[in-house]
């Protein structure tokens, strides 16, 4: 990184998802930088509504004026409510105004040549905000930012995500998360991509039935990578997930300060059969990784169809083609045939969205006319496309009109936009007009998982035509109270205001349709008792229920504006704007104006729109942060990418730099052969030529790592090296019903390696799928992907999951066997399995590896060759040979060990 000239700019970057993230760029002389001496994050989550305050205190330790840039990433659903800077005891607040008025101030500042704009780039889950200020020598500045959001339930859990990236040691760093849920907390788990076992000592979690407190307060020594270095180890994500207790009832009504919220997500309802048509874009722009990932996801989604479902596939480019003339049951035979069809989908040609969509509707209408749709079933259309229409009808408005007329409120449409070549607003409007929603699928290594994750959200409809009825004399200003479909793992939320003379008891009815019958939930809520619940100031903030109502109302008004006609749209916009100003929310209709001290220069923060990122490109996995120049605005390059006057260090493949960038470390290693005695007494020299002879020795065969290393408790031989040699594919490696664990793998005999290994736990329910590309953990149908050698520290009830920089993934449970997975990139490259605490195996353990934890007997050494002996396992004899193997358990380059080797 270039050393800035005198008067250089230093940037302090604070990145927030559901909490906050702080990042400062490192200069070559850290002692002269703008220094963060205190960073606190305080988040209070009351009844799903999160109120977060981030306070950062910095000091300029240099002898010249420097500029600090404060950058924030917010979740797309969050609203900033307050921002202020305190300099020399004077507070400079941000003022929220109507966007048009703020834009005038912004334009005037730009006309004067001043840097006035705040970053508006949008990332996958976040949108950015930044403000900068000049800091005098030895001066201190306090930044404070507040934002609020209603946490949505996603596949059975609420999630707070914190990115921690200070890039310097912080003397006082503390994060507090308080959660209060009157329904009761059913589970709570944390996950981090930077915590180590040592750093985890700074994390404390306390919990009772309704409250939880999570605190992270590392000391300076805990933040250090090593005692010799001043670098921080804090660099990654911190996630909190939880859910609440639920029953088969009308939900939970909570009341505070004259406002109520009604959460509805009944448990234990049966899934309604669905009729689903997948409409898949196979135009030329899908060529390459997109179509490969689409096929991969579609095959997995087809496997998840219920036998009670019906389905069909339509693929389209310039023309639309249906797989079958009618919908077919999701039988094993039909699903396997559909998978074969999906495997053969190739990308080429134009994009005819109109004909494909009308074909999907015609299939459903024909099935309905012929009474082939089961009574009470749900009909869904799922469209995946990566580009704008280029064939057939290409006018987006006409396509939307055609689709709306054809569907006529009878089916739900879900639109997935793959990448940034498609107009997201086009897909969003088409989906919202037809009872569904839109989602962007980001081009990345986990695109297939994103598609699967979306399908899981709509895979299990539980109720249709859900309506909430409240007494008109008791409530007013009620948010959306009718919903087309309620899906498993989600939650319906209604909020409103109690009338001044409302009854002491609030009654409610919830109507809906199950598969073969109607259902009505009736419940009552005592107002005084509910009000008393939220009296603890430690866990709530003033009038949070009213702000929750305002937040939800604004979000729904903005959504309704997407598909509203002009006159109605103006009325919706006026109401949303009024609420945004009244409750000080930065929304797409308002902006925050921040005036710098000592001058008229202002900066403007605006809520970005999804399509603002269109036509921008982000090289996958690349994120740069550098110094921001005093004389120029930062350049937006899309996503969460922000390059601040950073020198060009990267080029796309085919345009490699002459030398690696400074932070790309390259290493080289010279390995000299050991001097080894030849049986005749001669020795090998360095070029493997026998001295005194003319014969050249054969090439040296490197010691290989075995497929599995097994510790054998109770045996004189403590480790057994196992290699798989038999022609087999799917392998049951071990299973122990008492331990509630099963390990399977797919072994490629030709390549002598595992293509994947999968570990399944019964309690907690968790599946860990390891491949050479990454590790995928699935819990409650929710999947997360992790790259090898990325630090991971996850704690859930009864299970801890850790991965270190070596890439060793450990799955450990109290008084249970610890299972390890590793992607070994040394000799014999591939996935490896290891076991620890094997004395915990029960007598019911079995499987290809599990058998070695039953009655194992070692035979005597072979009299002719003491490097061989026989191993007797459950009536089978295995030949064991003493060999040198590489112990892979501590990562490359490995350590040579002598072990008894068995081939299975």
Image (tube, rainbow, N blue to C red):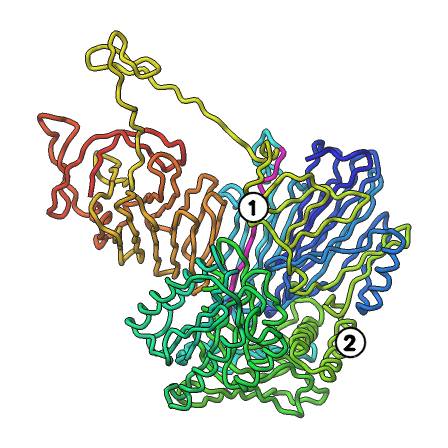
Nearer the camera: disc 1 or disc 2: 2
553 relative to 207 in the view: left or right: right
Which label number is shown at residue 684? none
In the foreground, 225 or 512 = 512
Majority SS type along the magenta span:
strand
- Spot occupied by residue 529 in the image (x, y as percentages of width and height): 61, 79
Quarter of the picture containing the N terminus is: top right
Q: Identify the secondary structure beneath mark 2.
A: helix
Q: Identify the secondary structure beneath mark 1.
A: helix
473 relative to 139 in the view: left or right: left
Quarter of the picture containing the C terminus is: top left
The quarter of the picture where residue 33 lies is top right
Q: Does the magenta stretch include residue 515?
A: no
Residue beneath disc 2: 578
Residue beneath disc 1: 202
Position of residue 653 relative to residue 613, above or below, is: above
On the question of residue 416 being in view, the answer is yes
At 38% from the left and 54% from the top, the residue drawn is 769
Magenta stretch: give its range.
Answer: 230-244
- Spot occupied by residue 707 in the image (x, y as percentages of width and height): 29, 41
In the foreground, 299 or 79 = 299
In the foreground, 887 or 405 = 405
């Amino acid at each position: 990184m270039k050393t800035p000239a005198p008067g250089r700019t230093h940037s302090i970057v604070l990145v927030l998802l559901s909490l906050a993230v702080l990042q400062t760029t490192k200069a070559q002389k850290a002692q002269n930088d703008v220094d963060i001496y205190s960073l606190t994050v305080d988040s209070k989550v009351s009844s799903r509504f999160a109120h977060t305050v981030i306070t950062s205190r910095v000091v300029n330790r240099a002898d010249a004026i420097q500029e600090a840039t404060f950058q924030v990433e917010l979740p797309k659903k969050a609203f900033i409510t307050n921002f202020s800077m305190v300099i020399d005891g004077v507070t400079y607040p941000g003022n929220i105004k109507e966007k048009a008025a703020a834009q005038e101030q912004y334009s005037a500042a730009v006309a004067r040549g001043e840097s006035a704009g705040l970053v508006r780039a949008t990332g996958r889950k976040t949108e950015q905000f930044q403000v900068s200020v000049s800091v005098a020598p030895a001066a201190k500045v306090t930044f404070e930012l507040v934002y609020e959001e209603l946490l949505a339930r996603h596949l059975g859990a609420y999630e707070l995500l914190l990115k921690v990236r200070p890039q310097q040691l912080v003397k006082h760093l503390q994060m507090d998360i308080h959660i209060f849920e009157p329904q009761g907390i059913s589970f709570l788990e944390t996950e981090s991509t930077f915590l180590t076992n040592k750093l985890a000592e700074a994390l404390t979690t306390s919990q009772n039935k309704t409250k939880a407190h999570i605190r992270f307060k590392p000391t300076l020594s805990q933040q250090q990578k090593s005692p010799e270095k001043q670098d921080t180890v804090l660099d990654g994500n911190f996630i909190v997930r939880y859910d609440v207790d639920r029953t088969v009832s009308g939900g939970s009504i909570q009341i505070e300060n004259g406002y109520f919220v009604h959460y509805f997500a009944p448990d234990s309802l049966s899934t309604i059969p669905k009729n689903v048509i997948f409409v898949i874009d196979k135009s030329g722009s899908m060529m390459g990784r997109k179509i490969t990932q689409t096929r991969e996801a579609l095959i997995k989604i087809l496997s998840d169809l219920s036998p009670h479902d019906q389905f069909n596939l339509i693929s389209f480019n310039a023309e639309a083609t249906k797989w079958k003339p009618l919908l077919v049951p999701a039988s094993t035979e039909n699903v396997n045939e559909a998978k074969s069809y999906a495997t053969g989908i190739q990308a080429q040609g134009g994009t005819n969205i109109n004909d494909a969509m009308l074909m999907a509707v015609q299939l459903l209408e024909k099935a309905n006319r012929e009474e082939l749709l089961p009574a009470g079933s749900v009909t869904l259309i799922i469209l995946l496309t990566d580009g704008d229409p280029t064939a057939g009808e290409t006018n987006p408005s006409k396509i939307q009109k055609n689709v709306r007329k054809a569907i006529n409120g009878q089916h739900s449409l879900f639109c997935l936009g793959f990448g940034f070549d498609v107009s997201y607003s086009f897909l969003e409007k088409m989906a919202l007009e037809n009872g569904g929603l839109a989602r962007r699928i980001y081009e990345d290594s986990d695109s297939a998982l994103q598609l699967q994750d979306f399908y899981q959200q709509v895979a299990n409809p539980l109720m249709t035509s859900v309506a909430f009825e409240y007494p008109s004399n008791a409530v007013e200003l009620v948010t959306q109270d009718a919903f087309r479909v309620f899906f498993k793992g989600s939650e319906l939320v209604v909020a409103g205001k109690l009338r001044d003379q409302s009854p002491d008891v609030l009654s409610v009815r919830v109507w809906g349709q199950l598969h073969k019958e109607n259902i009505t939930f009736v419940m009552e809520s005592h107002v005084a008792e509910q009000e008393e619940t939220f009296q603890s100031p430690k866990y709530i903030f003033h009038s949070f229920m009213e702000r929750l109502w305002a937040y939800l109302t604004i979000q729904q008004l903005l959504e309704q504006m997407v598909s509203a006609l002009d006159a109605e749209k103006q009325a919706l916009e006026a109401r949303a704007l009024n609420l945004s100003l009244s409750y000080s929310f930065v929304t797409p209709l308002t902006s925050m104006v921040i005036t710098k001290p000592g001058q008229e220069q202002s900066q403007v923060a605006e809520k970005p729109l999804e399509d603002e990122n269109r036509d921008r490109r982000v090289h996958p996995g690349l994120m740069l942060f550098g110094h921001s120049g005093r004389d120029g605005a930062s350049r937006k390059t899309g996503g969460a990418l922000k390059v601040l006057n950073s020198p060009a260090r990267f080029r796309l493949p085919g345009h490699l730099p002459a030398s690696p960038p400074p932070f790309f470390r390259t290493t080289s290693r010279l390995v000299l052969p050991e001097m080894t005695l030849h049986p005749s007494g001669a020795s090998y020299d360095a070029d493997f030529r026998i001295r005194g002879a003319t014969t050249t020795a054969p090439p040296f065969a490197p010691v290989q790592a075995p497929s599995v290393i097994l510790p054998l408790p109770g045996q004189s031989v403590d480790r057994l090296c196992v290699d798989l040699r038999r022609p087999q594919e799917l392998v049951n490696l071990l299973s122990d019903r008492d331990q509630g664990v099963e390990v399977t793998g797919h072994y490629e005999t030709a390549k002598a390696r595992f293509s994947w290994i999968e570990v399944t736990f019964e309690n907690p329910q968790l599946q860990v799928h390891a491949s050479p590309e990454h590790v995928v953990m699935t819990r409650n149908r929710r999947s997360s992907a992790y790259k090898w050698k990325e630090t991971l520290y996850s704690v859930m009830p009864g299970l801890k999951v850790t991965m270190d920089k070596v890439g060793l993934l450990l799955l450990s449970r109290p008084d249970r066997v610890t299972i390890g997975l590793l992607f070994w990139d040394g000799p014999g490259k591939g996935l490896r399995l290891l076991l620890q605490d094997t004395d915990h195996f029960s007598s019911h353990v079995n499987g290809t590896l599990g058998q070695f934890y039953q009655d194992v007997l070692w035979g005597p050494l072979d009299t002719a060759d003491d490097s061989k002996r026989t191993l007797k396992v459950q009536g089978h004899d295995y030949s064991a040979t003493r060999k040198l193997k590489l112990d892979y358990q501590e990562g490359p380059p490995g350590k040579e060990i002598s072990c008894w080797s068995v081939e299975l």
